[in-house]
Each structure stands twice: as C-alpha cells, then as structure tokens.
Image (cartoon, rainbow, N blue to C red):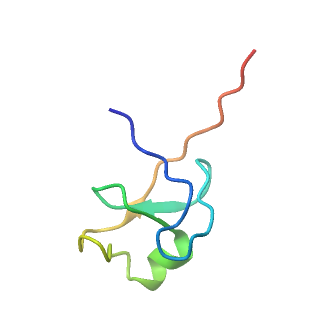
Amino acid sequence: MALEMKPRCEKCEGKTPPDADAYICTFECTFCAPCATSMGRSCPNCGGELVPRPRRREIRSA
C-alpha cells in the first residue's frame, strides 16, 4: 500500500507536489509547511501529529 501523495494543502489549497515540503498525519491529511506550522503541527481533522511527508522524486522514462 503506497502513501497517497495529495497534490494540494487541505487548508490553503496551495500546491504540494511530490518533491515539496509538506506535512501529513496518519490518515494522510496533507498540509503545506506554512499551514502545518501555523496549526502547531496538529491535524485539525483528527488531532494527530503532523510530520514531514517523505519526498518522492520524479521517475523519468528512459
């Protein structure tokens, strides 16, 4: 089961591409770094901790 890489912040609707700084909770709620910081790194949906989302590099075809 792969991590869902959501393309937008759930608070401000800003872009969160796979290689961007973003924060997630255990339910994969996704927030950009400024929004996560402004919320004290606490998910407003579940109350869980927001942690840095791992980055995924773009896969290039040969």
Residue farthest along the left direction in this orientation: 47
Residue at the spot x=29%, y=68% of the render?
A: 49
* Residue visible at 35% across and 67% down in the picture: 50
Q: Position of residue 48 (x, y in %)?
A: 25, 69
Point out residue 32 in the picture as x, y percentages from the top left corner.
Answer: 53, 68
Q: Quadrant of residue 14?
A: bottom right
**Image quadrant in which the N terminus is located:** top left
Q: How many marks?
A: 0
Q: Along the horizontal axis of the image, is 26 left or right of 36? A: left
Q: Is residue 50 above or below residue 19?
A: below
At 61% from the left and 56% from the top, the residue drawn is 20
Q: Residue furthest right?
A: 62
Q: Is residue 34 above or below residue 49?
A: below
Q: Is 4 placed left or right of 13 in the picture?
A: left
| Residue 29 horizontal/vertical position (percent) | 37, 61
Q: Residue furthest top?
A: 62
Quadrant assignment, res 25: bottom left
Q: Is residue 7 left or right of residue 43?
A: right
Q: Is 17 drawn above or below residue 34 in the view shown?
A: above
Task: Give the quarter of the figure containing the C terminus.
Answer: top right
Q: Residue at x 50, y 78 (%)?
A: 35
Using residue 19 as the reference point, say whether residue 48 is left or right of it: left
Front residue of 53/6: it is 6
